Image (cartoon, helix red, strand yellow):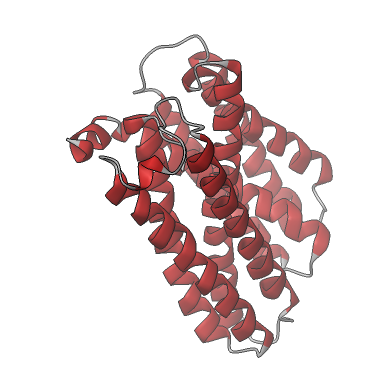
Amino acid sequence: MPADQIAENLAFINWTILSGVAAGAFGAVVVLRLRSQATTGYLGFTALTAAAFGALAWLSDGVLPASDWGSPRRLALALFTILAVAMAFAVGRGGRGVLVGAAGSIAATAALAFGALDWGGTPVGALLLLIQLVVLAAATGGVWAAMILGHWYLVTPKLPEAPLVLFSRLLLWVVGLQLVLSLVWLAAGAGPAAAGGFADLTGPWAMFVWLRLLVGLLLPLVVSWAAIQTARSRSMESATGLLYVNVGAIASGTILAAGLYFGAGLLV
């Protein structure tokens, strides 16, 4: 039964993945443009991938059930997609894209906020879901952008290692934050159907909860730490391989987190 319930909510899971990769990858471009020496080619390409995922999220939103916040959410996604394309051109021409980056970040956050208002239930529930969606986006989109950056080193070996080290370190902190939030939410019973007191670790959804914790959080935490060490030693092929593993692990964790929320009412 739990697997069937997750399957029934595939449209919501799909939206969470697509919007998360779009928002997180765009945020990565904004951060790296301001805080690192990442090349304009890499930043422009990653911004274009964020726009592509934003467009797919907009399309996927169209199959979700009609709701009060559906129209503003789709409008925010459409605006974000346009701004992500504008950001790609701005950084590609050597600009910093500060205003476009700020506007795109606001549009992405608004889309996630409208989703949280739609599916969070109570005001507190909406706030908790927004936190979950933002952190999922930071992890999923961040690891996507980091994996692309790893590839950039393979074709441009003279790039300084600082951008990849910075990115891997940020990813480590984001995944660590996810783990802390998950444990707090399991203890407090933060989800709309959560039992609290870590009871969900042994309940009917226990297998999916443990998979979320072990595969979606602990494994990426270890892999992110290893990516930092290999990037520092300029072993970029190894770092890129580790980031590939992280893409699969973090994406799996995001799917599990979305499935647990929309299928079981659990925040993990």
**Residue 172 image offset from top left, x and y in percent:** 62, 65
**Residue 250 image offset from top left, x and y in percent:** 46, 58
Of residues 189 and 55, the one drawn nearer to the viewer in this rendering: 189
Determine the residue positioned at 72% across, 63% down.
40
Q: Quadrant of residue 262?
A: top left
Determine the residue positioned at 54% across, 16% down.
122
Determine the residue positioned at 74% across, 81% down.
160
48 in relation to 267, above or below: below
**Residue 251 image offset from top left, x and y in percent:** 42, 54
Determine the residue positioned at 60% across, 59% down.
176
Left or right: residue 258 compared with residue 10: right
Left or right: residue 18 compared with residue 207: right
Of residues 203 and 139, the one drawn nearer to the viewer in this rendering: 203
- The quadrant the N terminus occupies is top left
Tell how many labels.
0
182 in relation to 262, above or below: below
50 in relation to 215, above or below: above
Q: Is residue 14 visible?
A: no
Q: Is residue 74 visible?
A: yes
**Residue 44 image offset from top left, x and y in percent:** 65, 56
Q: Quadrant of residue 46?
A: bottom right
